[in-house]
Amino acid sequence: MPQFRYKALSPAGEALDGIMEAASADEVIAKLQDAGNIPLKAQPADEAAGRGLGALFQRSPMGATQVLQFTQQLATLLGAGQPLDRALQILLDLPESEQARKVIDRVREAVRGGTPLSQALEHQHGVFSRLYINMVRAGEIGGSLDDTLKRLADYLERSKALKESVINAMIYPAILILMVVGALGLLVGYVVPQFMPLFEDMGAEVPWLTSLIMWLGLVVQSWWWLILGVIGVAAWMFSRALADPANKLAFDGWLLRRGMFGVLAAKLDTARLARTLATLVHNGVPLLTALAIARNVLSNTALSQAVGVAAEEVKTGGGLSVALARSKLFPRLALQMISVGEESGELDTMLGKVADTFDVEVRNTVERLLSALVPVITVLMAVAVAVIMMAILIPIFELTNTVG
């Protein structure tokens, strides 16, 4: 019988991870649910362990934008009084992607067969996140699925907007760096070697700087493919090293201590954590379960681990703000706002304000970072070009003076 690796949440909010023998992934999910757990993922053990490089090229049947549109449209239809199966039937004709239509069709067929929407979404194997499924499940239990989907759509839209704002802000410096590297590579690897025959014909004694630049030019010209290969292998080895949880944890902890970059990483994940917790808690998900789900939304494993430790303290009756503060990794302003929310009994509302505040903080930090990064790159390029030109011109000037 095949083995399946699964992840689930216990009724107490603890993360469960293991291997189970079963006929199919659906049977694993059913067994976990029968035991009172919340299934998060179930897939063949050999597939989970050996995806390798192929995982980089594996595309989800529904992208983030399609999931957002599906959520918004379903919330609108349910809010207009349409039955769930009828709403899904209407949505079936809207996506342009054939894969997306197949996902919606499978969900519709499962719902028509009596399966709850949350369980039908869960069976789509990773298309919908754990946060998404748990919110839908809470909405079904509370009898307010349309309102839940509206809040979920708002969450997805805000998260998408934050991610896109960071990516869009980084496009210009990324292009600038590529252009600088390309221009310097062309200058050193093609232009500089053209002067070598000239210096040899003149029989001039060149300075050490000129010799160094000439040697560097020959290396780039003759071995550019090896240089690119070494860079590619180094990047691959680095990504492989980060695949080890211990190395990833150490790197993420180091990153948080790196000045403005660390501040940006902390603020970005604080906004994600607060937005996720606010959405889940407002929707009636218990805080411990919400913390177990929210920690998996974070990109920095050091912060994720700190949330896990905080959840253990909350489980014993401690306050969330105090528990998070012990790690000394989260911004003080966020902790103070969470503390106010706990004292006033409006934790979900204050978490939403924390998320809004740090969305703005992230954008401001990115702008400050770029305002410093772009001039630095420009100056470095100017200095590099000046050094190369000096290395070429100095021997020419010395030879001219000698002849004169």
Image (cartoon, rainbow, N blue to C red):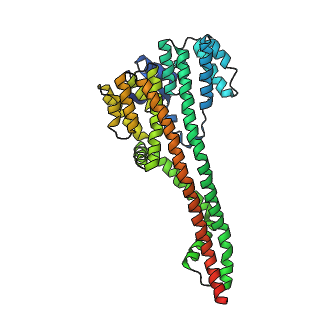
Residue drawn where x is 34% and y is 36% of the image: 325
| In-front residue for pair 211/147 | 147
Above or below: residue 404 compared with residue 386: below
Above or below: residue 266 compared with residue 258: above
Residue drawn where x is 65% and y is 71% of the image: 192
Query: How far from the left and from the top, in percent, is residue 137?
Result: 49, 18
Residue drawn where x is 55% and y is 50% of the image: 371
Residue 341 visible in the snapshot: yes
Left or right: 162 with respect to 189? left
Q: Quadrant of residue 399?
A: bottom right
Residue drawn where x is 59% and y is 50% of the image: 174
Left or right: 130 with respect to 325? right
Query: How far from the left and from the top, in percent, is residue 60?
Result: 60, 32
Query: How far from the left and from the top, in percent, is residue 4?
Result: 47, 29
Query: How far from the left and from the top, in percent, is residue 86?
Result: 64, 12
Above or below: residue 366 compared with residue 135: below
Left or right: 281 with respect to 102? left
| In-front residue for pair 21/301 | 301
| In-front residue for pair 261/130 | 261
